[in-house]
Each structure stands twice: as structure tokens, then as C-alpha cells.
Image: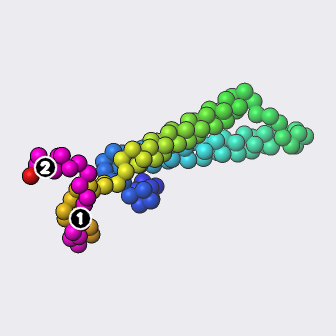
């Protein structure tokens, strides 16, 4: 999961990688609690069916069963919320730190190729002081 997220996001620095690691952790925990919820649901249903032949086909879960189901659902929702918070933080990080923009450069290396750029002077007074 971590490798897939890293491949998809291609982190630009350690902070983005850390956010991706958190996303992978929250995703794994969310899936664990979703599986737990499904397992508890199946066990409750099986136990209800196995009680007696003349029992109704479905009964609402008892208090302990309901608490277990509610707890598993709450945990899955919590980890989904944490995942979405980290995803939002990663998206915000990308908006705050856009790619590098080069200004006032005579020569720039782009993909191992040197390109000469004629940059217009924005501040004529500053140029005179530097000269």
C-alpha cells in the first residue's frame, strides 16, 4: 500500500513522504476495522441462526453484539477520517509549495540540457546598483 501511494504521489521531499506513510498506515487500519466489522456481523448472524430451529430467521443483535458492531464501525470511520485529513494535508502541501520557478537566470539546466534565457529586467534601479 505504501509503495502504491508513493508511486502515485511521487513525493518531492521527506515531509510529503511522511504524509504518504501516514496515509498508508490509516488505510491499513481502516481496512482492518472494516474486516473486523464484517467478521463480527457474520458471527452474530451465525450464532442467531444456530440457536434453535423455531427461532425467527433474524433477530436484532444483543447489547454486547451491538456494542461490538458499533465499536468496529466507529474505529473504521475514525481511520477513514484520519486518512482523509492526511490526504487533505498532502494536497495543501502541494498547493503551498509549487514547483520551482526560476527568475532572472542567464542559464538553466532542464533535463540535462542547458538553455540560455534572456530575462527582462524588472527593477532597473537595482540593476544599475549591481553593475
Q: State the residue at coordinates (75%, 30%).
A: 62
* SS state under label 2: helix
Judge from the rendering whether residue 30 lies leftward or rightward of residue 40; answer left or right: left
Q: What range of the chain is rendered magenta?
A: 112-130
Instruction: Of the two numbered discs 1 and 2 on the same chain, state the one appearing first in sequence.
Output: 1
Judge from the rendering whether residue 58 lies leftward or rightward of residue 13; answer left or right: right
* SS state under label 1: loop
Q: Nearer the viewer, residue 38 or 80?
A: 80
Residue lying farthest top? 63
The residue pinned by badge 1 equals: 118
Q: Quadrant of residue 3?
A: bottom left
Residue lying farthest bottom? 113
**The stretch drawn in magenta includes residue 119:** yes
- Crowd tier of the residue under label 2, counting other residues whose Cα lies within 10 Å: few below 14, some 14–19, many 20 or above: few
The residue pinned by badge 2 equals: 128
What separation in Å lies between label 1 and label 2 (alpha carbons)?
A: 18 Å
Q: Which mark is residue 129?
A: none
- Crowd tier of the residue under label 1, counting other residues whose Cα lies within 10 Å: few below 14, some 14–19, many 20 or above: few
Amino acid at each position: 500500500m505504501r509503495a502504491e501511494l508513493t508511486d502515485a504521489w511521487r513525493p518531492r521531499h521527506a515531509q510529503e513522504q511522511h504524509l504518504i506513510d501516514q496515509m498508508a498506515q490509516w488505510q491499513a487500519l481502516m481496512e482492518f476495522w472494516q474486516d473486523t466489522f464484517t467478521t463480527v456481523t457474520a458471527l452474530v448472524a451465525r450464532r442467531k441462526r444456530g440457536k434453535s430451529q423455531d427461532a425467527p430467521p433474524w433477530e436484532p443483535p444483543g447489547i454486547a453484539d451491538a456494542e461490538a458492531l458499533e465499536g468496529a464501525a466507529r474505529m473504521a470511520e475514525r481511520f477513514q477520517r484520519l486518512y482523509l485529513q492526511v490526504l487533505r494535508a498532502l494536497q495543501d502541501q502541494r498547493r503551498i509549495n509549487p514547483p520551482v520557478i526560476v527568475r532572472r537566470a542567464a542559464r538553466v539546466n532542464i533535463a540535462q540540457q542547458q538553455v540560455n534565457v534572456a530575462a527582462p529586467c524588472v527593477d532597473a534601479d537595482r540593476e544599475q546598483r549591481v553593475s
